[in-house]
Amino acid sequence: MPRTERVLRAEVVVLRHNDWGEADRLLVLYSREAGKLRAVAKGVRKMRSRKAGHLEPFTRVKLMLARGRDFWIVTQAETVDMYLPVREDLVRTAYAAYVIELLDRFTYEEGENRRLYDLVIETLERVSLMPDPFTSVRYYEIRLLDLLGFRPDLTYCVRCEAEIKPEDQFFDAALGGVLCPNCGAATPTARAVSMPTLKFLRHYQRSTFQEANRVELPQNVRREMENLLGYYLTYLLERRLNSPSFLHEVRRDMTE
Ligand SMILES: [Zn+2]
């Protein structure tokens, strides 16, 4: 998006909002056209504002935005999907909130990523409509890692590069993938991962959602998959969140 553009027509998902001034709201959005954006919705906290209902978190909405001094300003809003089942069921609400939070925490205002936008829209639809949203959220985590450049290596040992055999293995977040039993035993930070779970993770990694969803996950695999992906994502987020302050320190040292 050229920085000089005065008006932007965008389709967005609302990630979160904060009160802003007397009657306004500051929105954090993820847009199809320009990635993450911040925009002010003026007057939405006044009674009977027609825009207010369109701008709740995890709503998909079409917006007209005008460039303000600091942020974009919402001039028109039209709802595409409210994901009503997500609002009416606490489990779905929790899943959708997690999907949105991951997107929010892994992205900065760094421009368009159309595939990421499409992934989030597809995932919110699945979370809204599928009888059990579990697989759709695991699939989202795996594709999100791909699109952000953190795809874990699940085929070769990340230490000795031996091909992974069909047996129980180890996984290390810092090394970004699976370790053979020899290297795993010699790596204190590595966690055990069972062969069935690794098999399903690989299947998810190389499949469309329809293919991935066709196989039913055993209960113990569900638990292990969720824990392992959670461990890896948490590790990446902590490292990523630390990096801007580290960069800041380095820059300050250089100018002193
Ligand atoms: Zn190895």
Image (cartoon, rainbow, N blue to C red):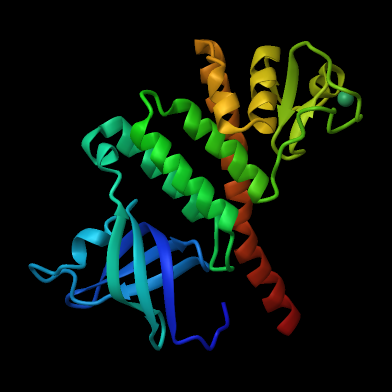
Q: Quadrant of the N terminus?
A: bottom right
The image shows residue 160 at horizontal and vertical percentages of 91, 29
Which is nearer the eye, 185 or 21?
21
**Residue pictured at 33% horizontal, 34% vertical:** 92
Position of 180 compared to 255: left or right?
right
The image shows residue 165 at horizontal and vertical percentages of 84, 15
Which is nearer the eye, 234 or 141?
141
Position of 251 compared to 223: left or right?
right
**Residue pictured at 52% horizontal, 19% vertical:** 222
Residue 102 visible within the image: no
How many numbered circles are shown?
A: 0
In the picture shown, does residue 17 fall above or below 222?
below
Q: Quadrant of the C terminus?
A: bottom right
Residue 240 visible within the image: yes
Extreme residue in the left direction? 47
**Residue pictured at 29% horizontal, 39% vertical:** 86
In the picture shown, does residue 133 fall above or below 193?
below
Which is nearer the eye, 134 or 211?
211
**Residue pictured at 34% horizontal, 36% vertical:** 128
The image shows residue 48 at horizontal and vertical percentages of 8, 67
In the picture shown, does residue 216 fall above or below 173?
above
Position of 137 compared to 159: left or right?
left
Residue 38, by quadrant, is bottom left
Residue 166, by quadrant, is top right
In the picture shown, does residue 135 fall above or below 105?
above
The image shows residue 236 at horizontal and vertical percentages of 63, 46
| Ligand 1, image quadrant it occupies | top right
